Amino acid sequence: MIQLIENKVFFKDGNITEKCDIPFEEARKNTIAYGILTNHNTGGDDENLKIKFDATASHDITYVGIIQTARAADLKEFPMPYVLTNCHNSLCAVGGTINEDDHAFGLSAAKKYGGIYVPAHQAVIHAYMREMMSGCGKMILGSDSHTRYGALGTLAIGEGGPELVKQLLCKTYNIKRPEVVGVYLKGQPKAGVGPHDVALAIVGAAFKKGFVVNKIMEFVGEGIANLPIEVRNGIDVMTTETKCLSSIWVTDDETKRYFDIHGRSEDFKYLKPKDVAGYDAMMVVDLSEIEPMIALPFHPSNTYTISEFNRNADAIINDVIPELKSKITPYGVLAQQGVIAGCAGGTFDNLCAAADILSLGAVGNGEFSLSAYPASQPEYIELMKNGVAASLLANGVSLRTAFCGPCFGAGDVPSNGALSLRHSTRNFPNREGSKPGEGQSAYVALMDARSIAATAVNGGIITPATELDPEYVNREYHFDDTVYKNRVYFGYGKADSEAELKFGPNICNWPSQSALEEDIVLGVCSVIKDEVTTTDELIPSGETSSFRSNPKRIASYTLSRKDPEYVGRATAVAEKGIPTAIRETLDELGAAKDIQVGSVIYAKRPGDGSAREHAASCQRVLGGLANIAIEYCTKRYRSNLINWGLIPFYFENEELPFDIDWFIYVKGVRSAIEKGETQVKAYAVSPDRQINEFSLTLPILGEEERSILLDGCLINFCKA
């Protein structure tokens, strides 16, 4: 189904070869990604890039913090199109007025600084950016990890909010030129196989091997021509779950058709690798061999074919997620809920295919329910015009407006103990909205819209869509942007400096942070020994997101589902400082009396998942100064740490010389960062005054990254 070629290869005349008559260093310059990055590099170094993007985008969980941060550094006007969508806190269901207050702030900021404001229920962020802002050869930066428009020829990157702040302040996105991994598609998918099936197969093959971590995936091969554009978009948006940096695809007449339909023909151009392109690795995907897939809790890489899962449900469930044993019935594995939503699931093609399958049988009046969320109002309108919306509704589907909530636990929260099947992006623990601290649990498995619809027809028994034989109607899509013209505020280039920002009581400025001092003492407030720690575990999703405009309030939720004692420990370090016994030991080690004190989290591999900067900023608000890890899962989490003044230390030995409630004395860290050194001496002191001497490794830092850490955070750096 999928072959991974881990060594460098050449792509010539549509074929993969390991030998060629030109040097690899020359051939690597012939990829699509290399050309786009070079065109956006504003610095003179071809390997250490300084990127300026064509446009930026945020949603209503992140844009308040971004604008507040940029304001603190004297923002005057958005220097590029900046789209503010309202698709995460759209329901305004938690916290009284605070979510709508954020929306009012967003509109006022769009007027004051010249932004594009998309009101709630109009479009999920990535649907709008595809429809209105993508362009072949462009680059877009978004404060959402699933910022991916590669199938439309746009190199898009999801990062934490501080990286958008830099763009809004006319600074650059600084990165060492990433490696490029080719993804060669061949063959044609079977009827009933959809984009999520292809995507989950790719994620399952790539994630655990770390095959594309922080690299760019470049899709090539004759199989691309066999995929409709929305299928490509659905595959593309899920590349985030491989931990890659970004993605880009060959563009063709099908891509051109998309831009023509959307009235933006001028944004299309043909993109393909030059005659001989060099890739740092290659993934070969035979689309004809892809089967309907399921990703079991609790990660999109936890993949099986549905047929394999059904054949071996007892063994697989017992091995992977024994809590689901109660779902095994004499007829198969029974789910309680289906959801088709968001940037991955709520596309026109997916909902049309689901309607075709549901023509074989309705959802029924049993426990299984099915809801669907068209990703944008223009798509919803077209589904109404062509009768698909009416068909879905008549067959028992609950049809909603554009909303990202089911992807992160703010909508369609299932009942306790239930199994939910979702065509959405993630199935991390508790991301469906349950609260384990209150005795609640629920489980999400990812599947394609087609197999979710087939499961609905079968009364909730998990069923691959390939087992049914509906008539798939090839419906033509007509894009009508009238609703956007009527509801979206298009303010780019129309900044009004006299306009006033509208603040609600929950919208607060970031607390001031101090610069890094020469020596530091770190109170160990959490030690997490899981192989991977997601950003959802560092700061929970769901209703917590309502407080993301209030740094201190959101910080109170840090690690609340993973280590509920963390906030109390970190607060104690910040408020009480160093305990007397440990202070005496530090005196013996020569530590200064007024030494800088903060907290630290240890996790083996933190940062998989969302781009949300709150995973780092909340630690900083609570007095955090550092993380210690074997490695950091994603560049975006490492960047978030640095931008919030948290040092991303490395310690590769799994045998730790410290534990919770110990304090770590780090000597000369400021000088080490200034000089670009990679090691610092540290002493771990236990509550009973045991001392362990060891070394911490500093990351290789760029000049700007060093300055940000030394200044204490990005806000301080920008002010300076």
Image (cartoon, rainbow, N blue to C red):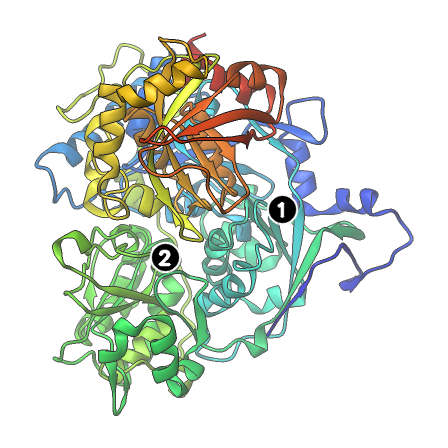
Indicate whether 266 appears above or below 209. above
Is 178 left or right of 491, judged from the image as shown? Answer: right
Image quadrant of residue 223?
A: bottom right
Query: Is residue 495 in sight in this rendering?
Result: no
Q: Position of residue 691 (x, y in %)?
A: 44, 29
Indicate whether 323 appears above or below 553. below
Residue 269: image tag: 1
130 or 434, nearer to the observer: 434
Helix, strand or loop at label 2? It is loop
Q: Position of residue 104 (x, y in %)?
A: 19, 28
Q: Amino acid at mark 2?
A: Arg
> Badge 2 local density, few (<14 within 10 Å), some, or many (20+)?
many
Q: Amino acid at mark 1?
A: Lys
Indicate whether 141 appears above or below 528. above
Residue picked out by circle 2: 426
Q: Position of residue 706 (x, y in %)?
A: 54, 19
173 or 664, nearer to the observer: 664
Indicate whether 98 appears above or below 655. above
Helix, strand or loop at label 1? It is loop
Real-space Cα separation, disc 2 to disc 1, in angstroms: 32 Å
Q: Position of residue 688 (x, y in %)?
A: 32, 31
What residue is at 57 percent from the left and 44 percent from the top? 214
